[in-house]
Amino acid sequence: MDANNKIEDVLATRILAGEATEAEMLVHNARLEDDADYRDSWDNFLALWDISWDALAFEEVDTEKGWEAVKAQTSAFVQLPRRSNFSLIQYAALMTGVIVAAALWLLWPDSQPATPSAFMAGDANLQEVTLSDGTMVTLNVGSRLVCEQPFSGDERRVRLSGEAWFDVAAHAEIPFYVETEELVVRVLGTDFNVRSLSDREMTQVEVGSGIVEVFSLAKANETVRLVAGDGIVFNRNNHQMTKVKANPNFMAWKTGRIQFFETPMTEVIETLERVYRQPVQVTDESILEERLGGTFHHTSFENVLEVVCKTFNLEQRTENGVVYLSRR
């Protein structure tokens, strides 16, 4: 990779600390959009940054069993604070210190039996990961997973930002935990989907097989037990966790297959927004009373919308990234 196409350490640190200027952010975002080498350099920087801080955080984790341990372990993850009075030299020194700390963590033979690892999916492709216990994970675009590898001790714990499907290897004595900002999912061996996007109001868990328990971090005593076909929806605004029937298409983002069986348009729109990450609204509430049937295999968002519009004699327009459906 050409050195001119790599992000500078000082600039990257300023961006992560929230101190980059508006002009710097405009240039940074434009290069992320247009320059693949620059984008790869930024992704690599983020991965190293995450590993650096998570290495320090894992040292503080209390592995005591029970709900109190779940809360303690979650709170132990270090969050990068905003810094408002650092000079450029101090930023460079901070970056150097973090990288050195990461290097010492990763290379010092007696520091820990396991190494904090970060896995990330890019903006265009899914990322498949096989963890040390045989658990298979598929990360949706833009998602990130952090965990110790190999797993050690009496539990297996990962932290997710974004959306991922898990096929957890069965180990009856070693439970598997998935942490998000709001929830902790506990399983022994099953397959399920977790969706926790920072720009969405709801966090969702849906189970394909087996049994999982979901703990709310907002309410320490609230636990929901799910079996195959169940799901939960957690509202970030009011911290309410509701048990629901899993969306039949909750795996469509991974499989590329969407099926509707006389499905209400409210659910159709929810599914399209979820699979394609494209907001859709209607200008006439009567559209939501329609029902759609059909199967789509690896079909583009535009083609699915075209079918919907032709089926119900609708027209579409896009404004500010939102698709609006209207009666003709």
Image: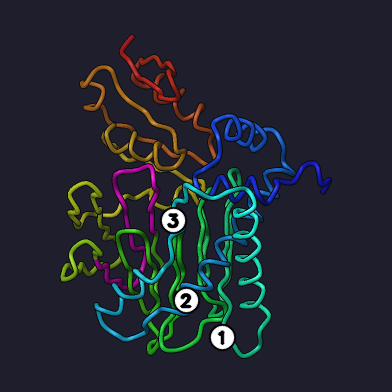
Query: Which of the two marks, 3 or 2, is nearer to us in this view?
Result: 3
Residue 138 on image: x %, y %? 52, 60
**Residue at image x 35%, y 70%?**
74
Give me the disc on residue 58: 2
| Amino acid at pointer 3 | Pro
1 or 2: tag closer to the N-terminus: 2
- The amino acid beneath tag 2 is Phe
Marks 3 and 2 in Cβ contact (< 8 Å): no
Q: Is residue 318 left or right of residue 26?
A: left
Disc 1 and disc 2 in contact, CB within 8 angstroms: yes
Q: Earlier in the sequence, mark 3 or mark 1?
A: 3
Element under label 1? loop
Image quadrant holding the C terminus, namely top left
Q: Which residue is at a point 21% across and 54% down the rendered structure image? A: 244
Please state if 120 lies on the left or on the right of 83 as rendered: right
Say which residue label 3 marks.
Answer: 81
Magenta span covers which residues?
194-215
**Residue 284 in picture, x, y percent from top left:** 24, 17
**Within-10-Å neighbours for mark 1: few <14, some 14–19, many 20+:** some
Q: Position of residue 11 (x, y in %)?
A: 64, 45
Side of 98 where 328 appears, left or right: left
Alpha-carbon span between mark 1 and mark 2: 10 Å
**Residue nearer the viewer, 45 or 278:** 45
The correct choice, above or below, for 129 with respect to 328 in the image is below
| Relative depth, front residue between 271 and 232 | 232
For disc 1, the marked residue is: 112
In the rendered view, would you say 320 is above or below 265? above
